[in-house]
Image: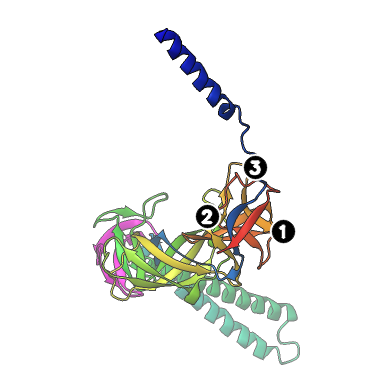
């Protein structure tokens, strides 16, 4: 009887709980969720970036020998500061000096022949004034001889001048004010042959060029003041101002960037060409654009979009990114100032969903 009472008690308890288990779940009351939105506004997009750059010399020249010979004297070495026209080295080529002397003598001989024929023609011409004294053919022959001797004399002058100019190449001179950065010869080196290394390499470092590969997204932006701030690895505690002077005008297909060239005065020579730098550039748009919080933009493998709210209904709007400013992003798409956008968008807010917008 005791066990039977327990079983009956359990059956009664189960019967009492059965209506609660079979009670249907409450249905959705149809009320829309409340979502925070904001009003889209235009703003000036500003982005400061730090990108690497490389310093190069304003001018670089390789000095080579135009005549063959042996280095007789060296006047400079690497690190030497030279002025325009300063003699860097002297080449010994005795055959050139002999050739110049030979041509000078030929000039003298040609000059003498010209003077002789000129004097003879002048006497023939004077005598021809009398009728029948000088035949016309003789007058013409002496004139032609004078002209021929004159041409030969002029040719000898040109040849001697050219030879003297070649002789002038025996002195290697600096083309402009610069510093010697490389020297590939010693006294006694044979120079003037093809495919040899340059004798010297000179760099004008009084003004340096800074080359920076600017990412494509910033190439049409404005650089206020056309300048940037530069720090080098060798002088990390010092900042230099670089002024933008030219742009490549073309996007490199491999790096998706455009080369911008800046100039940095370097009168003291403390900056070295070839150095890598960190360049800070601050870009801004010419005209105001649409700027939204980063949380308002949804990025998937297929698309990038924001969620617009119109009449309490959601709509996905595809956008293209501009400047990423950390917590904000510049966007472009089928949007207008005054549109309502979801502040924290996600893929769960499907197009056409009914929401209650809360303006934040």
Residue 6 placement (x, y as % from top left): 43, 14
Distance from the alpha carbon under mark 3 to that under mark 2? 29 Å
Q: Say left or right for 148 vs 64.
A: right
Q: Which quadrant holds residue 227?
A: bottom left
Disc ID at residue 202: none
**Residue drawn at (61%, 68%), measured in percent from left and top?**
41
Q: Nearer the viewer, residue 150 or 133?
A: 150
Closest to the observer: 45 or 274?
A: 45
Q: Quadrant of the N terminus?
A: top left
Q: Which residue is mark 2?
A: 295
Q: CA distance from mark 3 to mark 1?
A: 22 Å
Q: Residue at 59% across / 54% down in the picture?
A: 34
Q: Which residue is mark 3?
A: 28
Contact between marks 3 and 2 (CB within 8 A): the answer is no
- Front residue (pair 198, 141): 198
Report how many numbered discs are placed on residues in the image.
Answer: 3
Residue at left offset 29%, top offset 58%: 183
Tell me the element at label 2. Answer: helix
Select label 3 or label 2 by which is in front.
3
Query: Does 82 appear in magenta?
Result: yes
How crowded pointer 2 is (Cα within 10 Å; few <14, some 14-19, many 20+) is rated as some
Residues at circles 3 and 1 in contact by the CB criterion of under 8 Å: no
Provide the secondary structure element on which disc 3 rests: loop
The answer, for residue 138, to whether it is visible in the render is yes
Where residue 216 appears, as percent x and y from the top left, is: 55, 57
Report whether residue 99 is seen: no
Identify which residue, 9 or 312, lies in the foreground. Answer: 9
User: What element does badge 1 sit on?
Assistant: loop
- Between the residue at mark 2 and the residue at mark 1, the CA separation in whole angstroms equals 22 Å
- Label 1 belongs to which residue? 311
């Amino acid at each position: 009887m005791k066990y039977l009472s327990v079983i009956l008690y359990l059956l009664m308890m189960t019967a009492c709980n059965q209506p609660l288990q079979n009670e249907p779940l409450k249905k959705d009351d149809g009320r829309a969720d409340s979502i925070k939105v904001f009003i889209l506004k235009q703003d000036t997009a500003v982005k400061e970036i730090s990108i690497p750059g490389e310093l190069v010399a304003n001018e670089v020249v390789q000095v080579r020998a135009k005549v063959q010979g042996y280095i007789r004297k060296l006047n400079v070495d690497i690190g030497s500061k030279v002025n325009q026209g300063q003699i860097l080295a002297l080449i010994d080529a005795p055959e050139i000096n002999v050739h110049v002397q030979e041509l000078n003598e030929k000039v003298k001989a040609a000059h003498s022949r010209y003077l002789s024929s000129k004097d003879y023609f002048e006497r023939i011409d004077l005598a021809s004034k009398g009728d029948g004294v000088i035949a016309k053919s003789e007058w013409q022959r002496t004139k032609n001889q004078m002209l021929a001797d004159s041409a030969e004399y002029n040719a000898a002058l040109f040849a001697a001048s050219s030879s003297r100019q070649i002789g002038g190449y025996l002195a290697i001179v600096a083309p402009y004010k610069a510093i010697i950065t490389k020297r590939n010869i010693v006294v006694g080196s044979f120079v003037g042959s093809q495919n040899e290394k340059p004798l010297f390499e000179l760099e004008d470092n009084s003004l340096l060029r800074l080359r920076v590969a600017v990412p494509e997204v910033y190439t049409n932006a404005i650089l206020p003041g056309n300048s940037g701030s530069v720090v080098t690895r060798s002088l990390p505690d010092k900042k230099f101002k670089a002024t933008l002077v030219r742009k490549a005008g073309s996007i490199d297909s491999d790096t998706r960037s455009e080369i911008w060239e800046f100039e940095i005065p370097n009168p003291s020579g403390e900056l070295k060409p070839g150095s890598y730098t960190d360049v800070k550039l601050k870009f801004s748009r010419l005209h105001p654009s649409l700027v939204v919080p980063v949380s308002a933009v949804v990025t998937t493998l297929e698309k990038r979009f924001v969620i617009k709210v119109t009449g309490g209904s959601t709509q996905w709007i595809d956008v293209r990114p501009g400047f990423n400013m950390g917590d904000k992003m510049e966007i472009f798409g089928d949007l207008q100032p005054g549109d309502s956008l979801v502040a924290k968008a996600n893929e769960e807010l499907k197009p056409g969903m009914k929401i209650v917008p809360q303006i934040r």
